[in-house]
Amino acid sequence: MRLAALLVIATTGVLTAVVPGSPGTAAGLPYQDPSLPVATRVGDLLTRMSLDDKVGQMTQTERGVTTPADVTSYRIGSILSGGGSAPASNTATGWADMYDAYQRGALAAPLQIPMMYGIDAVHGNNNVLGSTIFPHNIGLGATRDPALVQNIGRATAEEVTGAGQDWTFAPCVCVARNDRWGRTYESFGENPELVTAMTTVVTGLQGQRLDGPASVLATAKHYLGDGGTTGGTDQGNTAISEAELRAIHLPPFRAAVQRGVGSVMVSFSSFNGAKLHGNKYLITDVLKGELGFTGFVVSDWAGIDQLDGQRGFTQAEVATAVNAGLDMLMVPENWRTFVGYLRAAVQSGQIPMSRIDDANRRILTKKFELGLFERPYADRSYAATIGSTAHRTLARQAVRESQVLLKNAGGILPLAKSGGKIFVAGRSADDIGNQSGGWTLSWQGASGNTVPGTSILAGIRAAAGSGTTVTYAKDGSGIDSSYRAAIAVLGETPYAEGQGDRPGSMSLDATDLATLNRLRATGVPVIVVLVSGRPLDIAAQLGGWTALVAAWLPGSEGAGVADVLFGDYAPTGKLPMTWMQSASQQPINDDDGKTPLFPYGYGLTY
């Protein structure tokens, strides 16, 4: 990589312009020769790196507390955006400008090692305003369509590339075994075979080659067993045998590794009381050894803080995590403390240099494979794909394929497009925020028209013919017996990890029940469209509903729901989770002997 001029830090700490090729600069060295094999380039670069360079590469910091000058001074290997952490201008240009500023900081250091930028693009590039928001994984699991999921990965990669980022913390390949868990919607399903089939998204994200057009580094998360915690508690303890861990939770990671996934993120949770962030057996012996994973392992947000159960992290925790096999540490806020601890741990012999070199080799290999040394700056040519018509069409296809028809008394669905009146109610009928769920523009998500798209109500209005009157009242007020059908779009409002755990009731709340009572009181047939991140406890109400459609969290293209309601497409979705009779059955899974309301794989059609 030959740049017209570079800024490097002189020993005085003053930024000085240096011409490439002059003594002390990196231009023209073997590791910068793209004709050489990656392994040769990595080996050459490692011989030139100081301990500070190596420590920096293993450090990932949050953009809100990191400047481009910090990247230069500390040789930081990666920046990330936490959920909702965005530049002042939340546009493709704003993101790409920010990326390039950090990259200039990285390239201003003497060895000119580019940084990577990580983002939670978990259902589209959901932090970037205007992106296509695809259904969350639970809905994609209902499609049983691995090819579709691969195409969604490809579209997401294009939108990520267009905003300048090169690494996504996706896919979540957890196997959710207890629907009380607030991350249930991030799982493709309760069955390891189903989740394994959906690892096609890795191929979509990374492309055929990491240095190919619009290829981004994918992350299989969260390793290992986070979907099996006792009580479905987020960051909890998975208390099962190793045999069950291997049978239920390991297969999707094996599949992701076989697809060449570039990184694996460790879970906050514990396995039989031992925090995963310090579990050398599962990280080094099983993942890197037995599964043959050659990418790098990254911690979750400040995950090393939790190893000793005390607030904040210590040098001992840093040593434990790195020796366990973590290669890059996500230390979003207290990263300067981490840098000091890691350096000291190596100098004192707590961490062998061989472990530091292994971590750097893994990280640098991916940077070379991504082509960052040749093309370090944002590829703005893909900005036009963000929220494009083609991607929204793909998302609409995913929405309609994810709809699961659970009840259809008297064949009321599909609805005729012409004649009479249809009443629409429910707080999620005209709320793109609700239908998109968590991890949408912000970490926990929010109600309201938070992102561009089409609400389910707008889709219904567009699908109904000119001879049909569509009336909407959020709370169901104003309905009378003159309507031929009432559509109630309700369920859960947005949440993400932690706040989404449901240790108590999993029923509809008083607001939704009041809306349903108003509709049912008229005698009009009620069609419930359930917008939720998991099965809900609805058995007590189901008898009063004429039809029930599980819409999951469809994202920005609500018209895909109407495509099924009005019969443009017959429903094909199948349950990715066993649907409980009551919350007291949790955990309930296929073949566990419990009688469900609807079994795993259930789904009607027309």
Image: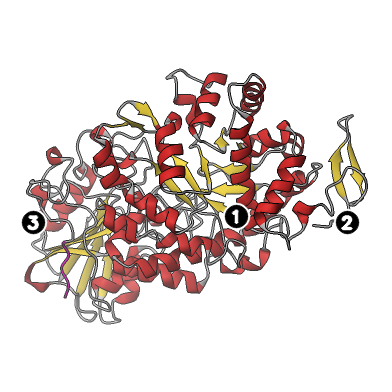
Q: Earlier in the sequence, mark 1 or mark 3?
A: 1
Q: Which residue is label 3 attached to?
A: 544
Q: Left or right? Give the position of 110 relative to 136.
A: right
Q: Which segment did they paint magenta? A: 602-606
Residue 519 versus residue 603: which sits nearer the camera?
A: 603
Specify the label residue 4 is tagged with. Answer: 2
> In 3D space, how far apart are the residues under numbered discs 3 and 2 (Cα atoms)?
72 Å
Q: Earlier in the sequence, mark 2 or mark 1?
A: 2
Query: At which x and y percent is residue 605?
Result: 17, 72
Scheme of colours in the image: secondary structure
Q: Is residue 170 above or below residue 506?
A: below
Rendering quarter of residue 34: bottom right
Q: Left or right? Give the position of 344 relative to 294.
A: right
Q: Quadrant of the C terminus?
A: bottom left
> In 3D space, how far apart are the residues under numbered discs 2 and 1 (Cα atoms)?
24 Å
Query: At which x and y percent is residue 172?
Result: 40, 49
Specify the label residue 166 is tagged with. Answer: 1
Kindly report the secondary structure that dominates the magenta region of the rendered protein: loop
Q: Give the residue type at disc 3.
A: Gly
Helix, strand or loop at mark 1: loop
- Which of the two marks, 3 or 2, is nearer to us in this view? 2
Q: Give the residue type at disc 2.
A: Ala
Rendering quarter of residue 553: bottom left
> In 3D space, how far apart are the residues under numbered discs 1 and 3 (Cα atoms)?
49 Å
Residue name at image x 24 percent, y 44 percent: 177
Is residue 552 in view? no
Q: Quadrant of the N terminus?
A: bottom right
Specify the label residue 445 is tagged with. Answer: none
Q: Left or right? Give the position of 88 relative to 184.
A: right
